[in-house]
Image: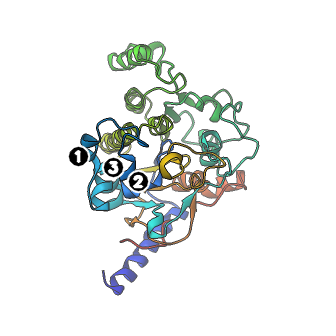
Amino acid sequence: MTRRHRWWRWCFALVVAAPLAAQGRTENVVLIVTDGLRWQEVFRGAERRLVSRSPGGVSDTTALLRQFWRDDVAARRSALLPFLWGTVAREGVIYGDQDAGSIARITNTFKFSYPGYNELFTGWFDERIDSNEYPPNPNVTVFEWLNGQRGFAGRVGAVATWDAFTRILNESRSGLDVLDGWDAPFRGKEAREPRRAMVNELYATSLKYWPGNTFDAPMQLAAKEYIRLKRPRVLFIGYGETDEWAHSGRYDLLLQSARQVDAFIGDLWTMMQGMRQYRGRTTFIITTDHGRGSGTEDWKSHGARVVGAEHIWIAMIGPDTPALGAIRGGDTVTQAQVAGTIATLLGLGPEYKAKTPRSAPPIVPVRGSVP
């Protein structure tokens, strides 16, 4: 790409990104989090030394290499996350490729889930939230705030695998629909419809391998049925297996679950673009709640003492997001900026900032350059 073409593309980014601060075309936002998925896998694909019996916990290394290993980095990451690199990177923007000088990070110092989700949902780091067992969130999230705005009441919800979101989103106070953990997603008359009854049956009969975290696949079905039933304008979807398999030291299952999450996100995008309410009016923000360490042991872990667990990645695709691809260089973006970005995309950025002055400013994807 010539210098002149790069200059014109930068100008185009400024023009396209300007509506993000005013009024864009986005009428619906879906925030999608795949828990604890490292930036290394997102931008580099499978890590060769972890495709091993030790330290990767892989029994069939030959099959895993055949599925995910490619000598070229771009081909390798595309083999792992084809929707992210084939659609999102082509039509949207991705931050966090440290190899290219793009930094995305959390602002909380705890580097684990509840503080991370509070930061994502409110726009700031609350030092009081220092445990995954912390009680119902005292802070008003952007989801709760939106649920109180005209045109959004009763049209904001969450579907996730981890049972902590009833606390993180303070379901009892916020009035949000929160479908999480192993509880049956649909109740009463809603559960009589055959597909939703089937989803409830899957939840009831699946092996509860993790007591507080269901598998991604039945949750995906619940999310799709929730969208068809409720037609939410703002939705949080949380996948949990990428974190669980990493903690278990199973690199093979981590890669396979990441690949499946990518397919699930692509399925949601296709489904929603086929619905009149969402077609051309919906932005997906795709990210993670924390990073992990590196090396032969720390890839399994995160937390305050784990170096590198502060680094994450953030991707966006939608009608108000310029097609900048994987950002090279540019300013650091943070997890705390996601809440303000959601409000801003929906044309309510100044109002949200006035209500939550501690929240970080929105991400405006105008700096950096594409490969």
Label 3, label 1: how many angstroms apart (C-alpha)?
A: 15 Å
Residue type (three-letter) at the residue carrying disc 2: Val
Sooner in the amino-acid sequence: mark 3 or mark 1 = 1
Residue 296 spot, x, y in % from top left: 48, 48
Assign a secondary structure to mark 1: helix
Q: Is residue 75 visible?
A: yes
Badge 3 amino acid: Leu
The image quarter containing residue 197 is top left
At numbered mark 3, what does the secondary structure look like: helix, strand or loop?
loop
Q: Is residue 318 visible?
A: no
The N terminus sits in image quarter: bottom left
The reply to whether the C-beta atoms of the residues labelled 1 and 2 are less than 8 Å apart is no
Picture coordinates of residue 184 (x, y %)? 48, 18
The residue carrying mark 3 is: 81
Foreground tag (3 vs 1): 1
Which residue has dot 1 on it? Answer: 66
Q: Residue 37, percent across and down? A: 47, 46
- At 70% from the left and 33% from the top, the residue drawn is 134
Disc tally is 3
The mark found on residue 42 in the picture is: 2
N-terminal label among 2 and 3: 2
Position of 198 with respect to 349 (left or right) is left
Disc 3 crowd, CA 10 A, few/some/many (<14, 14-19, 20+)? many
Kindly indicate whether the residue at mark 3 contacts the one at mark 2 (C-beta within 8 angstroms). Answer: yes
> How many angstroms separate mark 1 from mark 2 (CA)?
18 Å
Badge nearest the viewer, 1 or 2: 1
- Label 1 crowd (10 A; few <14 / some 14-19 / many >=20): few
